[in-house]
Image (spheres, helix red, strand yellow):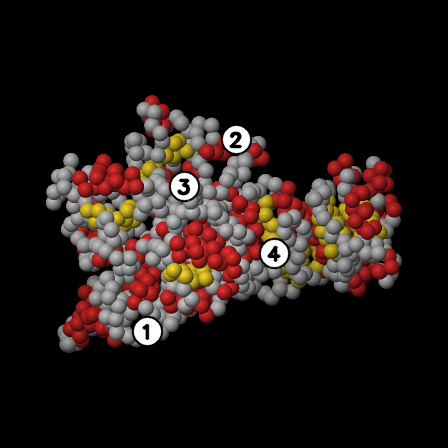
Amino acid sequence: MADQGGSGALFSNCVFMFIQDKELDEKKIDTLTDVITNHGGSILEKPSSRRPEHLAEDKITHIIASTIEFEDYTMATSMMIAVVKPSWVQVSIMKNRQAQIRPFTPDPRMIFSDVVLSCADIPPTDKDTIIGATMAMGGMDSESVTKLTTHICALSTDHPKCQLATQKKLKCKVILPHWFDDCFKLGKRIDEGPYLLPDALYLQSGLAAEVAVPSSQHLEGATSAQPDYMPTPDNTGGARPILDAFKGKKVMLSTDLSIRDRLQEIIEELINNGGGEVVDKVEDCDWFICQYRDGPQYVRAAQACKTVGNLSWLYFVITHNKWSNPLHRLLHYPIPRDGIPGLKGKKITVSNYGGEARIYLENLIKASGAEYTKTMKADNTHLITARNNSEKWDAAIDWGIERLNHLWIEESYAKCQAQPMTTASYNTFPPCTNLSSIIGQTFLAEERLRALYYPGGPEKLSPSSKLKRKAQDMADENSSSSGPAEGVVIGRQAHKEFDVMMDTDADLVEKSTKVFGVPAPQKRRPTTQFATPAKGRHVRAGKENETPSTVSSSSRSAKDKALNRLSALAPDINLYEKEKKRGLKDYHGLWGGKRAADQIEREHLNRRSVSSPTAGGEEDEKDAKAEKRPAKRARPSLPEIEKRVVLTGFHRWVKDKHREDADRKKLRELGIAVVMDGQPCDYLVAPSLVRTVKFLRNLSKGVTVVSSNWIEECLDTKQMHKPEDYVLKDKENEKKFGITLAKSVRQARVNDGKLLWHTPIYCTASIKNGPDGYRAIAEANGAIFMMYSARSGTTIRPTRPEEDDGGPDPVYLLSNSSPEEKKLWPKFTDMARKGNMEPRIVAADWLLDVVMKQEVFFDDKYLVTKFFAKG
């Protein structure tokens, strides 16, 4: 046990401060105080002042808190003060040394901060990945299973680690690695239940539809940026409570709030009774309350690092009687008046979210400038869904609507720009999990807000505002710049051998490694006498000692930069000057260029001179032969492409990929290029008249159709023959299809791909051979091709006959005679007639025959009621 209270005690060099809240109440604080003081630590009973710099004045080394929602947090992170959960104290005492900081940070972005992981039967590569990512996000790795182990990652419960946990009745969970994978993809911690062994729902099929909508734990008082009413403060004693959160605070209410006089009087009364003060000037206030991110008052308040929130945030403070960071809840910060770039004009609907989560998403979509719709129609652009299993999801697939989870709209709003929809986290939908459980955990990006809404800064700032701005800049520098822990700051260990405020990074790394076994986290900027300027910071001229601060200034002149760089280059410069002074006569001068080339040549001559005459003669003979050897002939380039062809039904290459590759090369050497379907071509090559997609698409272009015998002859004779001599002739199939091929080609050239120009053709999803081929054929001829299903809405505008200039135009539905599709016919017929159009529900053969003939015609024999009756 450590020396109780002595100089060698566990916490002898530590000064602690507690942040009281519901989880860390006064009783727990008293208990922890006794434990810490018994092990040599000091407790800050009362701050020396309410100024932001009191953390340095009081020499705080550790802040114990169960949350990061306190006003000193930014200042603490700028000074790399360790902010830890209460459990850090117990673990440190158990280990008899100060525990690492990262696993005990209360920052919710470190999603595995309370996970102690031990891997079982996991492949080595996967094991390393899981352990590395878990530790990066706040977890710890344990090779063996102990009482502290919280999770065993395994594929089954047969591993000895799992059996040991069962025998000893440990409280750790045996979980599939898929849980870690899904958490890594989302960047959020989802429910472990479906992944727990031995009976993991994740591995069972048929349970996708049984997932209940969970409650949203992070949306309390944050579902709307414009609340309809003021909630009642927590009241347990009957009388109106005193709001300590306002004590010593000056609050300004902006004129853009548009609240009634009576409501404003009530709010001002609550503030004044709580020890606060309502002011009228931005420069005098601590908190600035407004609705929108614009206007001179908002800009000045934000630039001066005032706490800026909206009415919803103020109500939250009143209700819970505690300060919270308005940047940590998207709808607690003033909203953009003109929406978010990239989201204006979008029509977004929501699925699989319920209760507060649905209300929150509705308000967030509106605040972003997009349009929210309760129902989904074909003109919607996005579906925000918590699962990939719903009627809206299936309909969105049919209509080609983008499908994403709520992280896309949250991060787009937080970063003030529509985010790429291809990002993996936005398209991750873990089975048996409803993503409502992780909604509302996204923080606003302060650096993006500053760049877009309040860049630069006023020339004159109060000392307090200057210090806050420096602290914010340094907190940004100390935080992780990318990865799963982006924006998170991990404080440094405290120990008597080094001082958090005085030692350099190198000192801290060396000493903390010696004491704790791991290096202290380094700042991303060097803490030398020439400090690197904060990224994106506007540096203004002024007195360096104008504001008393323990935080070193990050500004530096160009002269200091140059001096610092010269200092770093000094050893190299001295070495260069020393080399320059050496003489060249003894070949000890600067190496390189002509000197290097001369020395290599001399060494080569010396080797030849000391060799035997015979050897020399042999070498001369070899050199002479080498000189006589003809230069390697350059490979002839391929001839220009003369013919571009598309092949269909070419039997020579069936199930013979090697022969196909060799033949393609031979044809290319003859000037014939075989191109992909859809690319420009000169000839369509086919063995006969066939109704394939390739044949009909390229016939629609009016290209010459030649027999595949032409390609065969070219390959066999290794010569290009005239394709005109091999024009396809197939009388049998011409009679079968009722066409003349030469006439169809001529007609296609006249039609120029507009045979079915703007003709609406619908198709059912279960059509024989699938709808994709028919889509390609129809669109190649200018038709408007659309899918039709039971969930399809009205896509034909209702029109009365008197509103139409001509008679009713036909509209086609490609269908078959299955019972499911017969149910669609009345609905399609009704939609067409309401639009003053003639409904024609036909077999797909109508489209194939029309395109083959390159002439629009219709016969009742193609109607599904007659066509399938024949069979």
Residue 776 locus on image (x, y percent): 70, 53
Q: Residue 540, labelled with which disc?
A: 1
Residue drawn at 49 percent across, 42 percent down: 216
Please say if the residues under marks 3 and 2 sit with CB atoms less than 8 Å apart.
no
Name the amino acid type tagged 4: Glu
Residue 292 relative to residue 725: left or right: left
Quarter of the image with the C terminus is top right
Where residue 852 sits: x, y (%)? 79, 53
Q: How far, Cα to Cα, is label 1 from label 3?
A: 53 Å
User: For the residues carrying marks 1 and 3, which lies nearer the camera in this image?
Assistant: 3
Q: Is residue 549 left or right of residue 838?
A: left
Closer to us: 270 or 104: 270
What is the number of the mark on residue 237? 3
Q: Tell which circle, 2 or 1, labels the residue nearer the N-terminal end.
A: 2
Q: Which mark is residue 371?
A: 4
Type of amino acid under label 2: Gln
**Of pointers 3 and 4, the one earlier in the residue sequence:** 3
Q: Nearer the viewer's eye, disc 3 or disc 2? A: 3
Question: Crowding near pointer 2: few (<14 within 10 Å), some, many (20+)?
Answer: few
Q: Identify residue type, mark 3.
A: Gly
Q: Upstream in the sequence, badge 1 or badge 3? A: 3
Which residue is nearer to you in this view: 255 or 746?
255
Return the residue at label 2. 204
Seen at 25% across and 40% down, the residue is 30
